[in-house]
Image: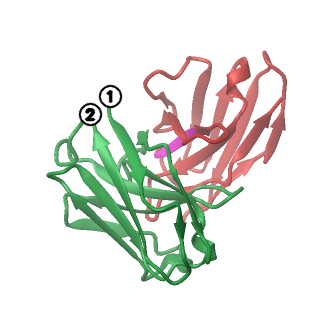
Amino acid sequence: QLRLLESGPGLVKPSQTLSLTCAVSGGYIRKGGHSWSWIRQPPGKGLEWIGYIYQSDKSYTNPSLASLRGRVALSVDTFRNYFFLEVTSVTAADTAVYYCARGGVGNLDFWGQGISVIVSS
Amino acid sequence: EIVLTQSPATLSLSPGQRATVSCRASQNVGSFLAWYQQKTGQAPRLLIYETSNRATGIPARFSGSGSGTNFTLTISSLEPEDFAVYYCHQRANWPRTFGQGTKLEI
């Protein structure tokens, strides 16, 4: 059974960079032709799809999330079976639960448990 | 982007009753519409994909229908564990989008 697990800081200061890791087990990122996504959920709100990465060098970030424009980087380490999210210059608006998931091109069929990130000084 | 509008925002029902949640898309998404269930404090779980296909392990009381711009999630007879928030999601176009959610409460 595929499992995903997010890790990273639970508290980030404004203007700093948020770096999150998603560890994939029970399967291989480099096999199967899947894409790998990040989604976030601000407190009390709905789901926002941040973007996905595919085959190490192809990524897509959501241009409709204006608040994230130009601040998001997605990357993957296919040998260690991790993928990553970086958000620079964070503000309080980036406070959310962040989920990693398999899919993006395809359906989001496996999700991590989520990691709560608070941006506060 | 494709906007997905769910209705109702909140649905108050009792165990054993039938639940129907609607999702309307601002553009044609073909059959590329999925439904997710999210319980409090948990990650979303894929219920239905490509409009009407149940994901692995999803009970038969969950069903999906529709096409184009109008879709429906139906729970035929509510179990206590079904009370949660439900989201529709389209992967027909970029960026992928979600509906705003429907809270199914007792």
Circle 2 crowding by C-alpha within 10 Å: few under 14, some 14–19, many from 20:
few
Residue at 72 percent of width and 44 percent of height: B102
Residue A103 pos. (x, y %): 36, 48
> Overall secondary structure of the magenta stretch?
strand
Q: CA distance from mark 2 to mark 1?
A: 5 Å
Residue B5 image position (x, y, % from top left): 68, 55
Label 1 near label 2: C-beta < 8 Å? Answer: yes
Chain ID for label 2? A
Q: Which residues are magenta?
A: B32-36
Task: Name the residue type under label 2.
Answer: Gly
Q: Which residue is mark 1?
A: A1
SS state under label 2: loop
How many numbered marks are there? 2
Can you say whether B22 is above or below B93 in the image? above
To which chain does the residue with label 1 belong? A
Mark 1 Cα shell of 10 Å, populated few (<14), some (14-19), many (≥20): few
- Looking at the image, which is closer to me, A84 or B7? A84
Report the chain shown in green: A
Q: Which mark, by number, is residue B55?
A: none
Residue shown at 62% from the left, 45% from the top: B87
Q: Quadrant of residue A26?
A: top left
